[in-house]
Image (tube, rainbow, N blue to C red):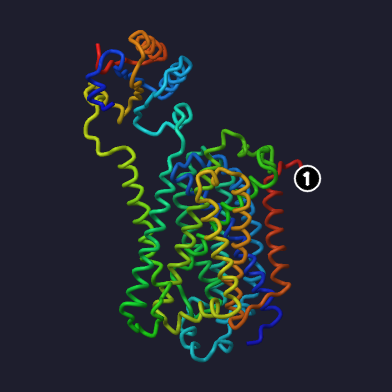
Amino acid sequence: MIVGFWQQVLASYLFAYIAVLSIVLGAMLQIMISHLSGARWFEGLRPLAVRIVGAMPFVAILALPFLLGVHLLYPWADLARIPPDVRDVVARKHAWLNIPFFIARGVAYLVAWCVIAELIRRRDENDPSMRRISAIGIIVVGLTLTFASFDWVMSLEPSWYSTVYGVYVFAGGILASLALMAFVTYRGMPNRSSSVDPNLPDLRAPESERQKASLGKLIFTFAIFWAYIWFSQYIVIWIGNLPSEVPWYSSRTHTGWVALTVIAVLGQFAIPFLALIGYTAKRRERVLALTGACILFAHVIDNFWLVMPSVFPTSFHVSWTDAAAILLVGGLTIYAARARSAPRSSIA
Amino acid sequence: MTDLQLLMAGPSASRLLAEFQTPEEMLSAIDALKRESYHDIETFTPYDVPDVDPRLGYRRPKLGLISGIGGLTGLILAYGIQWWANVYSYPVNAGGRPAHAAPAFILATFEGTIVGAAVSAFVALFVWLRYPRPWAPEDEVEGFERSTIDRFWIGIPSFASERDRDHAIDIASRNGALRTVKLGGA
């Protein structure tokens, strides 16, 4: 299969976009979960999470390239590109997988996320309406994120499907958003006040000790949850051993791509699990910052692993466009989050 | 000295209990007692009051280590049994899958780890605390059962003299004790 230049560019862009988007949505889910469960330990982290969520409208605009390039990126948009043995199966999915409906759904997801993000951003944590917004928002985001991951990533291989796919994407997103918060808060020299911003609560102060431990425990828990979902999908397909399902994994475990499988599982499960299992480790700023960095790196690799083997199934392939895309999307999103959280006077 | 001996022993060995309405009052009484060099203070609280541990010099228990070793044992046993049965003792060709089917073994290995860790923690806790202990002298005190509901109790197992004990009663009362109870002795 010859992959055109634009397909390569769009695939690189899609991988970077999903890696960043899942973090923003992960932070959004965290905030809503904290309102629904009445979690007091999240109060200190909330302002940081809200800043991440603040980038959502900008991230929505960043979806334009691959929504406009559907016909170049997705094989189902042109049945002639589908291998003849599965062409029938894909043709039967036409009612769902067609360009106008795909774009309309995409716009609907993005609008829903922007509305919820802005509702969260414009209310403070004690606002009584936050509970209702969270109750509805968590259902909306849960469903839209699931369908977005089906549409945008899973449909790169339109004859293959996995029902747990959406959970996999948001498990990774929540884990990575916690890792980002840990990294941003505890990077730099230990035992100095948070370098992020004087307006944020000081999470390095001695009275934040319990909050620190909670963050450590939560990262530990979600690393296990992510691995649990990873394995759930793998074991079902491995043991079923069906010709329609197995190729997705065989291109990821029996080619050069296997290296990324190992990195993703080590970086998002094995290393955080061993690093954070101890009582004192969860309370050590250095451990939290380094584990956070490790998970973020593995999260990027994991999303690369989700997208790229679908485009290049036979052998490992990396291009300069991959690095360019993650720098572009990541950089612009960080810029947007920072600009939107800065006081008005400093932007003008 | 057993609890019964404690109960029967003379005034110098009698035990003192004090009841408090709030954890804060209990903590301030503990601080005051410690300033006057009383040791071996125990607490009976309806829930975990984290500030108690550093005051009474409790170190972190080694339960995690025991549970970890138990978990590891469960892991090795569960994987070992599956390997022994499927690879060595009675290999079966199931749809061409390898006899040593590591992905399929992981499920039961995971369960084995959990069982090993949970059971070892449970047993270790019972041995450590000498459970089951259906009766203790404190149970004879009217209202002591509220230490599992909404009251905070402290206990001092023994005193050098009666004057020492009366002084402790005084300290407890000044720090807000609702009442003090002498167990055993005069």
Considering depth in this image, is B89 or A148 the residue closer to the camera?
B89
Q: Tag count in the figure?
A: 1
Q: Residue A302: which quarter of the image?
A: bottom right
Residue A346 position, x and y percent, is: 76, 43
Quadrant where the C terminus of chain A sits is top right
The residue indicated by pointer 1 is A348
Q: Could you tell whether A137 is left or right of B47 in the image?
A: right
In the rendered view, tell whether residue B122 sits above or below residue B166. Answer: below
Considering depth in this image, is A302 or A75 the residue closer to the camera?
A302
Q: Residue A6: which quarter of the image?
A: bottom right
Considering depth in this image, is A275 or B12 the residue closer to the camera?
B12
Considering depth in this image, is A261 or B185 the residue closer to the camera?
B185
In the rendered view, tell whether residue B103 sits above or below residue B172. Answer: below
Q: Residue B42: which quarter of the image?
A: top left
**Point 71% across, 68% down: residue:** A323
Callout 1 amino acid: Ala
Query: Farthest bottom residue?
Result: A84
Residue A37 position, x and y percent, is: 43, 45
Query: Farthest front residue?
Result: B1
In the rendered view, tell whether residue A325 sits above or below residue A140. Answer: below
**Point 44% across, 22% down: residue:** B27
Q: Could you tell whether A43 is left or right of B115 in the image?
A: right
Residue B32 position, x and y percent, is: 46, 16
Query: What secondary structure is found at the residue carrying circle 1?
Result: loop
Q: Chain of mark 1?
A: A
Dot 1: few (<14), some (14–19), or many (≥20) neighbours within 10 Å?
few
In the rendered view, tell whether residue A163 sits above or below residue B149. Answer: below
Residue A127 position, x and y percent, is: 51, 39
**Point 68% across, 57% down: residue:** A333
Quadrant where the N terminus of chain A sits is bottom right
